[in-house]
Image (cartoon, helix red, strand yellow):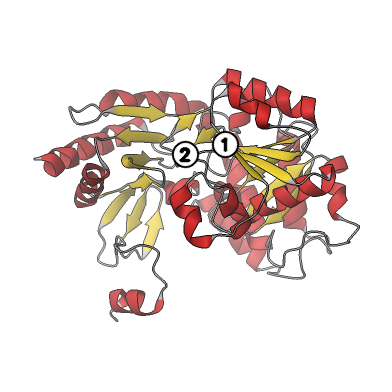
Amino acid sequence: MDHRHLFFRHLAQTSPSPLQLEFERAEGLYLITPSGEKYLDLISGIAVSYLGHAHPGVMEALRQQMDKHLHLMVYGELIQQPQVMLAAMLAQLLPSSLEQVYFTNSGSEAVEGAMKLAKKFTGRPEVACFHKAYHGSTQGALSLIGSDAMRQPFLPLLPGIKRLEFNSSDALHYIDISTACVIVEPVQAEAGVRVATKEFISALRARCTDTGALLVFDEAQTAFGRTGKLFAFEQYGVTPDILILAKGLGGGLPLGAFIASEEIMQVLSDNPPLGHITTFGGHPLSCAAGAAALTVLLDSGLTDSVAAKEKCFRQLLSHRVIQEVRSAGLLIAVEFDSAQTCRKVIQACIGQGILTDWFLFAENCMRIAPPLIIDEEKIADASRRMIRAIEKAVS
């Protein structure tokens, strides 16, 4: 069967030039074509597969849950063991104020829920966010996106959005008593891995506390060891009022969450009841996979190995056309002089058996975010292949 023909005929396209690679299986660090060719996955399905693909512990948890049940009822009405167990695990790992979990299907939906929660709890109309931020593509989340080009075709979006300069403490005076919440990424991934400074996050936390605005950390891409800590906010000595998780949360299956205190979260339960509702959020398979993956991560020591692996990549990714390498653990941006050069390098990497990507708001930067299970030998091999790809692209 010609899957490529069916791909273009029946799947809605999201770009004018999709990669068109067909993969039949995935194992560990590798994506495998129907003919058996292996490609080294250096983007983890965009920060999803932190244990690599088809991890035995995750697959066994899925088999066990499939023998019990799949969907039972809309989220939040029935006591379902996979949901309860994953929520309890997260609460044990987080500060005591982040004790209640609302599971969603995705990061975008978690952002939508967090905005509703903040508005309901504070009674305020406005939300603050940052230039070059990415929080999802649904209309509410899109209202926060830090790109005029991506917002413009879909106007009008949500009113009451204040867009501030990232890493600028001077911009924080725009947060005031009309602000329900401020949503921030500790690392702006889609801006090409721009890391928030400790001074900025401290000032942001203080301003939110002073004005009564809720501080929301979007850790869809940075949680689960990616930056060298289980959660990136741990590096800042502050606690958000609401935490957003997604991507890796489901162990390879669709799952998102927004997490807050009981005091904050309870406002969604009345006036009106079912103030936020989802049919498939917290699907039992997703929660079972997420709990299994998180258990492996906690037992493996992989998070502690991230800094050394980051250093290895930074040492080996050296070439005359690389303008800068920025990193936050195993979330790495390799910057070139132009988007055209970056696209050529990404295509050449495919020729070297490596899958990489670019960033939404930094098209001149190549994304490297491999599964955390990658070892230094594989990093050295991948880096050599990427350097060869760069040579081919710019020759």
| Image quarter of the C terminus | top left
Numbered disc 2: secondary structure: loop
Q: Amino acid at mark 2?
A: Ala
Q: Is residue 186 visible?
A: yes
In the displayed orientation, state which residue is furthest to the bottom.
Answer: 1
In the displayed orientation, state which residue is furthest to the left.
Answer: 395
Q: How many marks?
A: 2
Near-viewer residue (12 or 92): 12
Quarter of the image holding residue 171?
A: top right
169 lies above or below 380: above
- The structure residue drawn at horizontal position 13% and vertical position 38%, both measured from the top left corner, is 391
Residue wearing tag 1: 185
The x and y percentages for residue 184 are 60, 36
Q: Is residue 52 visible?
A: no
The x and y percentages for residue 101 are 75, 47
The x and y percentages for residue 122 are 83, 42
139 lies above or below 328: below
Q: Which mark is residue 189?
A: 2
- Crowd band around label 1 with a 10 angstrom C-alpha radius: few (<14), some (14–19), many (20+): many
Near-viewer residue (257 or 344): 344
In the image, taking residue 215 as reference, residue 10 lies left or right, namely left
Give the distance between the C-alpha atoms of the residues marked 1 and 2, in whole angstroms.
8 Å
Numbered disc 1: secondary structure: loop
- The structure residue drawn at horizontal position 72% and vertical position 25%, both measured from the top left corner, is 207
| Image quarter of the N terminus | bottom left
The x and y percentages for residue 81 are 77, 57
Near-viewer residue (200 or 376): 200
In the displayed orientation, state which residue is furthest to the right.
Answer: 271
In the image, taking residue 39 as reference, residue 123 lies left or right, namely right
